[in-house]
Amino acid sequence: MIEVKNPTELIQALTAKDASIVLTRSMMLTHSITLPNATSLSGKPQEDSALPILMFQDSDGIGLTANNTIKNLIIHTPANHRSIFNTNYETDLGSFGFENLELNGQFSFLSKSKLNNTFLNLKNINIIAADTRGYLEQPQKYGVNVLQGALTIYNLNPDKNSLITVNAKKSLSVKKFSCYRFRCFYRWIW
């Protein structure tokens, strides 16, 4: 486990592929970051018990690869960007854990054609704002396009064996949105 207190230390920890990265201070980044495979990113409460804020100036936030965990953080991107998104489209992405997060920006997990299975565990996720009107991936059924939501889990793989399993506990909430609250798309069925 490595504790980081500024953007330089965070980038160094990501480059070194540390397995467990703990933010001890709030910070702003000018570009998105990607968690290496099997990396955990968490926040340590500060002296006033507030969780650290990870802010992204004008970009998406945290990209996922495989077997990642993000917990105890406040993640702020512009509302029309993604706060958490997946970047890897391998056959088996393993499992992902998300706990005690406050997000500004979309939580997006889209699977592409290679995915066979993955598991998402969501607990206590609060989305403050998300504007998802600009995203291109929109399912169409019966001549209607459906916009993505503030929390979008979308399986684009037409293979019947492709599976995203979601375990959502406690509260999932959206305060301000310019689209639909939650959408989970599974092979064009919603």
Image: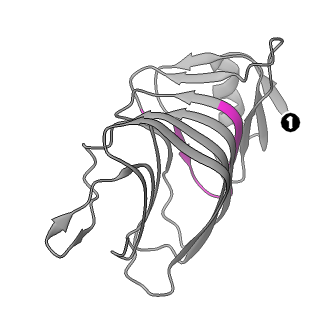
Q: Residue furthest bottom?
A: 160
Could you tell me if residue 61 is visible in this image?
Answer: no
Q: Is residue 76 magenta?
A: no
Q: Residue at x 52, y 67 (%)?
A: 90
The amino acid sitting under disc 1 is Met
**Which residue is disc 1 drawn over?**
1
Left or right of 174 in this view: 172: right
Q: Residue at x 40, y 75 (%)?
A: 157
- Give the crowd class for mark 1: few <14, some 14-19, many >=20 residues within 10 Å: few
Provide residue 128's location: percent of width, then percent of height: 49, 32
Provide residue 32's location: percent of width, then percent of height: 49, 32
Asked if residue 30 is positioned above or below residue 178 in the image, the reply reads: above
Could you tell me if residue 126 is visible in this image?
Answer: yes
> In the rendered image, which quarter contains the C terminus?
bottom left
Q: Is residue 72 magenta?
A: yes
Provide residue 134's location: percent of width, then percent of height: 24, 43
Asked if residue 145 is positioned above or below residue 151 in the image, the reply reads: below
Asked if residue 3 is positioned above or below residue 68 in the image, the reply reads: above
The magenta stretch spans which residues?
60-73
